[in-house]
Image: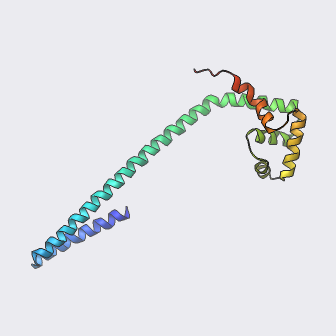
Amino acid sequence: MRNLIVLILFALFFIVDIIVDINEGIPLAHVWHEAIMFVFALGAITWQLKVILQKNVHITTLNTELFDTKKSYQEWRAKTHASAQEIRQMIDTQFGLWHLSHGEKDVALLLIKGLSMKEIAEIRATQEKTVRQQATAIYKKSELSGRQELAAFFLEDILSTPINPT
């Protein structure tokens, strides 16, 4: 936008200079030279306006796509919210059956989400060693061999259920 303003100022300067030169009787060759510069300035202004308009169209398109994506995401969240709550309740119930402590439940959820031991330690503001010990306790209490079996325990039935297209 700053470039456009500078170009407009140059064009105005050339117009004023041409008018002053004509009134002062400056040779026509000099006036034509300035007129050519004015035409170049107008061309540059036109080009800048075209670029600005293209960018505005692109921004408008991106904003429309972003709005549509957000709307689609919100619709998806609204549709899946009840199911997600139900699944979370089922997971909490299973954690209770395994007699997991509050900390172990937190770690188990983060393991299921796929976070690393280091990331879990950072989130929980604890040592990585503590998270590893809690993970070991989770696997022992659940009689599962590791992170993959823990995630699969909860996802297997969900993913094996046929998807209803309606």
Residue 34 point in image, percent of width and height:
19, 72
Q: Is residue 57 left or right of residue 85?
A: left
Which residue is at a point 74% across and 25% down the rendered structure image? 157
Which residue is at a point 21% across and 71% down the rendered structure image? 14
Residue 132 point in image, percent of width and height:
85, 47
Residue 88 point in image, percent of width and height:
75, 32
Residue 159 falls in which quadrant of the image? top right
Q: Is residue 40 left or right of residue 80?
A: left
| The C terminus sits in image quarter | top right
Using the image as rendered, state which of residue 12 and residue 131 is in the foreground: 131
Residue 22 falls in which quadrant of the image? bottom left
Residue 99 point in image, percent of width and height:
89, 34
Relative to 49, residue 41 above or below:
below
| The N terminus sits in image quarter | bottom left
Looking at the image, can residue 22 be seen?
Answer: no
Which residue is at a point 53% across and 36% down the rendered structure image? 71
Q: Is residue 53 left or right of residue 13?
A: right
Using the image as rendered, state which of residue 146 and residue 86 is in the foreground: 146
